[in-house]
Image: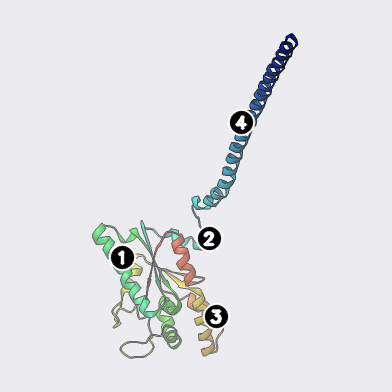
Amino acid sequence: MELLGIWAYSMATVRSQATKEEVRMDGKWLQSSIARRLFLTRLGAGVGVVGAAAAGAPAAMAQAPADAAFRPARHGQDDWYDKIPGVHRFVFDAASANGMAWTLQFASNFYTANVDAYGLKDSDLAVVIIARHKATPFAYNDAMWAKYSKQLSDQTEFTDPKTKLPPTVNPYTAEDSTLQQAGKMNALIKKGAQFAVCGMSTRGISGRIAKANGLETDAVFKEISANLIPNTHMVPAGILAVNRAQEHGYTFTYAD
C-alpha cells in the first residue's frame, strides 16, 4: 500500500509537469501564430497600397493629356489673322458661285445685326471670307475677268444671267449687275472684310489659262496675284485658311 501511494504520487507529479510544459508550449505556439498573422496582415496591406498605386498610375498618365489645353502652332505667314481689328471674329467659307452669293449675304447680315442690335461699329468685327475651289475667281478684279473670261467662267461654272455669256467683269463687284448680291462685295470691303484667296486653285486656273493662250503658268499666276480685289490675302490653299482661321479664334460657317 505504501509503495502504491508513492507510485500514484509520482504519476500525478509527472502529469502536472507535463501539463505545465504543454501550456508553456501552447503559449509559445499561440504567440508565434499571432505574430505570423500580424506580419501577413501588414504585408497584405502593403501590397494593396503598392498595387493600387500601380493600377492608378496608367489612369493618371492617361488623364494627363486631357488636362493640358491644346495649343496650335503659330506661323509667321498666318499673322494677318490676328492683325484684323475686332472684338468678334467670323470666317465664311465659299467654294462655289452660289456659295459666294450666300456668303456675301450672310456676312452682310453679320455686320448689320451687330451694328443694329449691339451698337457695335464695323471696325469691331473681324471678318474673313475664303474664296476657294470654284469660288476662287470671284476674288480676281475686273481686269482678269475681262482678259480671261472664258476660263474663269468655266472654273466657276457661272455665266451672266442676262446674256448667258461669260462675264467680262467680276459679277459680285459690279454695281450694275443683275445679280441679287451685286455691289455687296464692294460694300463688305469698305466695312473692312478680308478675303483669303486659294493659291492652290489659282495655280490650277493659271495652268489652264496658260495652256489655252500659249502662256507660261508662272507668269499667269504672277499676273493674277497682282490683280486681286482689295483686302485680299493669297493663301497656300483655301482649305488651309479654313483651319488656320479657326485656330486663330474665328467662328466658322460654310455657305453652299
- Point out which mark residue 76 bears: 2
- Looking at the rendered structure, the kind of residue marked 2 is Gly
Q: Residue at x 26, y 57 (%)?
A: 118
Q: Name the residue under label 1.
A: 110
Image location of residue 218, percent across then percent down: 56, 79
- Secondary structure at badge 2 equals helix
- Point out which mark residue 245 bears: none
CB under 8 Å between discs 1 and 2: no
- Looking at the rendered structure, the kind of residue marked 1 is Phe
CB under 8 Å between discs 1 and 4: no
Colour logic: rainbow
Q: Earlier in the sequence, mark 1 or mark 2?
A: 2
Image location of residue 208, percent across then percent down: 51, 85
What whole-number distance in Å separates the C-alpha atoms at marks 4 and 2?
68 Å
- Give left or right: position of 36 versus 142: right
Tag in front: 3 or 4: 4
Q: Earlier in the sequence, mark 1 or mark 3?
A: 1
Tag in front: 1 or 4: 4
- Point out which mark residue 219 bears: 3
Q: Which of marks 4 and 2 is nearer the N terminus?
A: 4
What whole-number distance in Å separates the C-alpha atoms at marks 1 and 3?
38 Å
Q: Name the residue under label 4.
A: 38
Q: Residue at x 48, y 60 (%)?
A: 79
Total numbered labels placed on residues in the image: 4
Can you tell which quarter of the image residue 90 is in?
bottom left
Q: Which of marks 2 and 3 is nearer the N terminus?
A: 2
What whole-number distance in Å separates the C-alpha atoms at marks 1 and 2?
29 Å
